[in-house]
Image: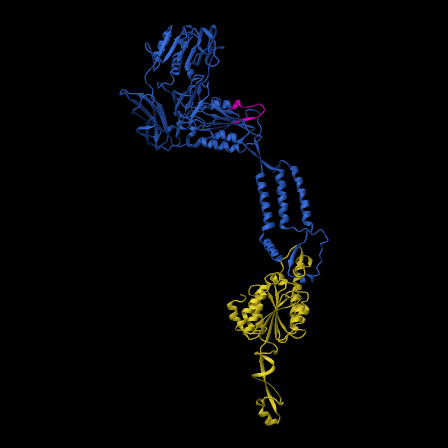
Chain colours: A yellow, B blue
């Protein structure tokens, strides 16, 4: 079980807020860029034959002598894509376990809000860049999504940028997107830049405590878990200071690139209580309410 | 601090290679991390090509240098010197008189001596002389502490008086010219000054533990007019308070009655009591419920004498002195008719010897004795020392007009005139035989003061094994056990232990225990023949527990050397080495911070 009953009860009272109007096939709870049948007035337009003449504003016709049709806001479902990084680097320091909880948490929240939630894993199986997961529109489908998440194992290396390209189909990702990743891949920058998301989203940047404060000493050969490449490092106070500076730059740059792509950014240390921390951060950013 | 092997400090140079090892850059440890992405951005100068690195004084290096230092120190064998009572050769003279049983004096003496044994090294030798009634060298020139310890631990207090003078003479006899010898006397000082005080070359360890003591100082048995035995008991109170005492009287181990006494402080109480005991019974008196400082004197035993007289038949010229002697010796009487228990052959032919016999210059020698010639006008020149038969008998004035010259290699010669044996003891056909090589009428022996005593003792020896007179002497007095030839004898001590005596042993000397000694002879066919019973009593003077300072002159008997002991620090230094090695191991392998890192590395490598 990814989410505890207490957390699930909490999540059912929250919903994801879209920054932009959604464009979807099915009606839902989010404002659509299309005009619809809601009670919220949106605009006028000239009458064209075939329009429902019940929407003609008779007051304006009387005053102006022009036939104008009243248009109302449409409410449509929001496509919510939850992308979880299952690269091998996520297997360290409990990052993947935290990432899985976060992905499940936001998926559950989307289902509770009536969103169309679809899960993705990066990288995919058998050399594919993306693994497409199940889709859910209601809480009753949560168990299917949860089961899929539970089956994921962070074992392979892959390209985040390729996955993003495939996800967006060289265009804009429709709906909202949640990316849960440590971004420790050489193409993390183009990946974030390529995330043109229609209705916003959030990048949950999960890093292990040992990555933030490495406890290494002596002369070492650091072996990259994904590429296998080795790097000779002689640790010292200066080395560790420079590492911390690089990490800070990394996080700031990731935040900047995410923002430019219309995404919120939360740096999540892989520690117990990460879920609460993320919910608080998203609430402050008004990404959930 | 000095060092036995200072050259070992050269090994301290090993610190150089150790430090060099720390300055050598170690092979990089491979650590798997999620990604090297951030590390690659650091643009770090990696100096793996340089084999050296700056020396860092890590706790591990400091500990290893300390281990090396301690190890070198161990090999250098540091030592210090210590003054000790042990010299190059030290003779422990340990008093085992009865008073040494008071208040644990002997145990304290042994403890102090054993403590000194801890200083024993290759440079020291130790001898142990037991100063009991019969001084004895237990260990001579020993370097083995275990040997000396065994001898010391085997010491027990006797019931007799210590012959300290004899023991010191024995100790001095152990001195050798090449090795300074000192004597260490562990004693309470005895009750009289030694003839040679101050004792030169000796140190005195005074043992003066004392406590209240209640002692059986007199216990005697006499036949009473009622036909029973009357016991006379005297109990002495050596404490400053009046006490009540109860004495249990046992006959052959069975309670025969109790005697209650009220004894004033530092006084004696006496009482007689009738005892239903006959000849040969062992009558013991024992102070019950008496927890005093000296327990050896709480008990005394006697054997009831008497019984039918031994019949003595005198065959031969019949010196009137012999007849008078037989009639005068208690327990013996002349046998005019009937079988005799003891024969006296006064000259004449040699009969078949089938009973104890006293041969006085017979015309033919018995088995084992050869008469070679006669010697005239000779005089006593030798009396066998320590021989109970000759105790207090002075024969130095005895002259002999004519004596047989005999050779008797298996017989015990008691008295000689030059090389000519005059009085011998032996055995013929399993019977005791006393042999006088001269006719009594051809000597002045019969007019000597000691003749009745000598004659009585010879009769007693010949009549040994009967329940007649039982010798009662102070503890430590030897017991005449047998003729010097077979059969083998065995002695049952008061505590029940049985000692086998080798053939030819004339006296049993280990009589320190007060109590009843029973001698038995083992015939060649293995059967036991009852021998004499002897009683050895606790010497009453020892009950007081008097303590006296023995004056010593100091200095060694031979040339004196300072008595210093080399004590090595090795146990401590080795302990330090082990401790440092343990700490070094812990720091290197078990330190919590390190183990956490190792655990983390294990996770990294997953």
Residue A270 in view (yes/no)? no
Total numbered badges shown on the rendered structure: 0
Q: On the rendered structure, is B214 left or right of A8?
A: left
Look at 66% across and 37% down and name the residue there.
Answer: B7
Q: Position of residue A10 (x, y in %)?
A: 52, 71
Residue B295 in view (yes/no)? yes
**Residue B239 is inside the magenta segment:** no
Q: Residue furthest front?
A: A126
The residue lying toward the viewer, choosing from B604 and A49, is A49
Q: Quadrant of residue B563?
A: top right
Q: Position of residue B130 (x, y in %)?
A: 48, 26
Bounds of the magenta segment: B171-183
Q: Position of residue B581 (x, y in %)?
A: 60, 45
Q: Position of residue B471 (x, y in %)?
A: 38, 20
Q: Is residue B18 above or below residue B524?
A: below
Q: On the rendered structure, is B283 left or right of A8?
A: left
Q: Is residue B357 above or below residue B574?
A: above
| Quadrant of image for the C terminus of chain A | bottom right
**Residue B181 is inside the magenta segment:** yes
Q: Residue furthest right?
A: B49
């Amino acid at each position: 079980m990814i989410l505890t009953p207490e957390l699930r009860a909490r999540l059912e009272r929250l919903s994801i807020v879209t920054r932009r109007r959604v464009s979807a096939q099915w009606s839902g709870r989010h404002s659509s860029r299309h005009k619809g049948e809601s009670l919220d007035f949106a605009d006028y337009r000239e009458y064209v034959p075939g329009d429902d003449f019940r929407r003609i504003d008779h007051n304006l016709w009387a005053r102006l002598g022009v036939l104008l049709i009243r248009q109302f806001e449409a409410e449509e479902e929001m496509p919510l894509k939850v992308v979880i990084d299952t690269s091998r680097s996520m297997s360290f320091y409990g990052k993947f376990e935290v990432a899985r909880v976060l992905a499940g948490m936001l998926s559950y929240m989307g289902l509770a809000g009536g969103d169309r939630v679809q899960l993705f894993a990066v990288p995919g199986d058998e050399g594919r860049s993306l693994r497409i997961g199940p889709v859910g529109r209601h809480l009753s489908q949560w168990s299917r999504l949860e089961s899929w998440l539970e089956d994921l194992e962070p074992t392979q290396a892959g390209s985040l940028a390729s996955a993003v390209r495939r996800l967006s189909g060289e265009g804009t990702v429709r709906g909202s997107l949640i990316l849960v990743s440590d971004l420790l891949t050489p193409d993390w920058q183009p990946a974030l830049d390529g995330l043109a998301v229609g209705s916003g989203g959030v990048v949950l940047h999960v890093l292990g405590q040992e990555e933030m404060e490495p406890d290494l000493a002596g002369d070492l050969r650091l072996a990259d878990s994904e590429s296998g490449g080795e790097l000779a490092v002689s640790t010292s106070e200066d080395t560790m200071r420079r590492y911390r500076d690089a990490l800070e730059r990394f996080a700031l740059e990731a935040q900047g690139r995410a923002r430019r792509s219309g995404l919120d950014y939360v740096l999540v240390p892989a520690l117990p209580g990460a879920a609460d921390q993320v919910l608080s951060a998203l609430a402050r950013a008004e990404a959930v309410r | 601090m000095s060092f036995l092997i200072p050259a070992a400090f050269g090994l301290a140079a090993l610190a150089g290679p150790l430090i060099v090892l720390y300055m050598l850059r170690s092979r990089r440890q491979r650590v798997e991390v999620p990604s090297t992405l951030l590390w690659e951005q650091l643009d770090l100068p990696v100096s793996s090509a340089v084999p050296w690195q700056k020396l860092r004084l890590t706790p591990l290096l400091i500990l290893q240098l300390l281990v090396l230092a301690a190890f070198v120190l161990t090999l250098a064998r540091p030592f210090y010197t210590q003054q000790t009572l042990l010299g190059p050769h030290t003779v422990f003279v340990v008093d085992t008189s009865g008073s040494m049983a008071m208040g644990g004096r002997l145990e304290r003496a042994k403890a102090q001596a054993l403590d000194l044994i801890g200083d024993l090294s290759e440079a020291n030798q130790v001898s142990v002389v037991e100063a009991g009634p019969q001084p004895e060298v237990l260990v001579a020139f020993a370097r083995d502490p275990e040997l000396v310890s065994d001898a010391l631990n085997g010491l027990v207090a006797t019931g007799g008086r210590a012959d300290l003078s004899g023991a010191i003479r024995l100790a001095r006899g152990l001195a050798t010219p090449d090795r300074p010898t000192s004597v260490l006397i562990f004693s309470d000082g005895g009750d009289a000054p030694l003839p040679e005080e101050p004792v030169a070359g000796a140190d005195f360890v005074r043992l003066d533990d004392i406590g209240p003591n209640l002692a059986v100082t007199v216990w005697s048995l006499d036949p009473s007019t009622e036909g029973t035995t009357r016991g006379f008991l005297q109990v002495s109170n050596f404490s400053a308070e009046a006490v009540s005492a109860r004495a249990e009287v046992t006959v052959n181990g069975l309670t025969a009655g109790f005697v209650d006494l009220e004894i004033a402080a530092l006084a004696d109480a006496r009482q007689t009591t009738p005892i239903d005991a006959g000849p040969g019974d062992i009558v013991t008196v024992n102070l019950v419920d008496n927890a005093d400082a000296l327990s050896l004197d709480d008990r005394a035993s006697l054997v009831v004498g008497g019984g039918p007289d031994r019949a003595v038949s005198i065959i031969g010229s019949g010196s009137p002195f012999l007849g008078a002697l037989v009639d005068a010796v208690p327990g013996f009487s002349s046998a005019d008719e009937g079988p005799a228990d003891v024969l006296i052959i006064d000259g004449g032919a040699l009969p078949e010897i089938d009973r104890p016999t006293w041969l006085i210059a017979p015309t033919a020698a018995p088995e084992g004795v050869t008469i070679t010639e006669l010697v005239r006008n000779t005089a006593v020149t030798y009396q066998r020392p320590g021989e109970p038969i000759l105790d207090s008998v002075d024969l130095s004035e005895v002259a002999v007009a004519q004596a047989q010259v005999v050779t008797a290699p298996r017989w015990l010669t008691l008295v000689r005139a030059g090389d000519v044996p005059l009085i011998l003891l032996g055995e013929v056909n399993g019977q005791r035989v006393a042999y006088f090589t001269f006719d009594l009428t051809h000597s002045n022996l019969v007019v000597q003061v000691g003749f009745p005593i000598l004659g009585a003792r010879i009769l007693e020896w010949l009549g040994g094994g009967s329940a007649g007179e039982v010798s009662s002497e102070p503890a430590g007095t030897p017991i005449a056990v047998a003729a010097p030839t077979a059969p083998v004898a065995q002695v049952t001590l008061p505590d029940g232990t049985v000692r086998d005596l080798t053939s030819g042993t004339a006296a049993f000397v280990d009589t320190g225990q007060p109590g009843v000694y029973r001698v038995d002879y083992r015939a060649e066919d293995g059967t036991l023949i009852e021998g004499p019973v002897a009683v050895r009593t606790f010497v009453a003077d020892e009950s007081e527990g008097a303590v006296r300072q023995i004056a010593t002159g100091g200095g060694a008997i031979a040339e004196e050397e300072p008595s210093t002991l080399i004590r090595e620090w090795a146990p401590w230094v080795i302990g330090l080495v082990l401790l440092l090695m343990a700490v070094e191991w812990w720091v290197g392998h078990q330190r919590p911070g390190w183990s956490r890192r190792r655990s983390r590395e294990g996770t990294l490598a997953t």
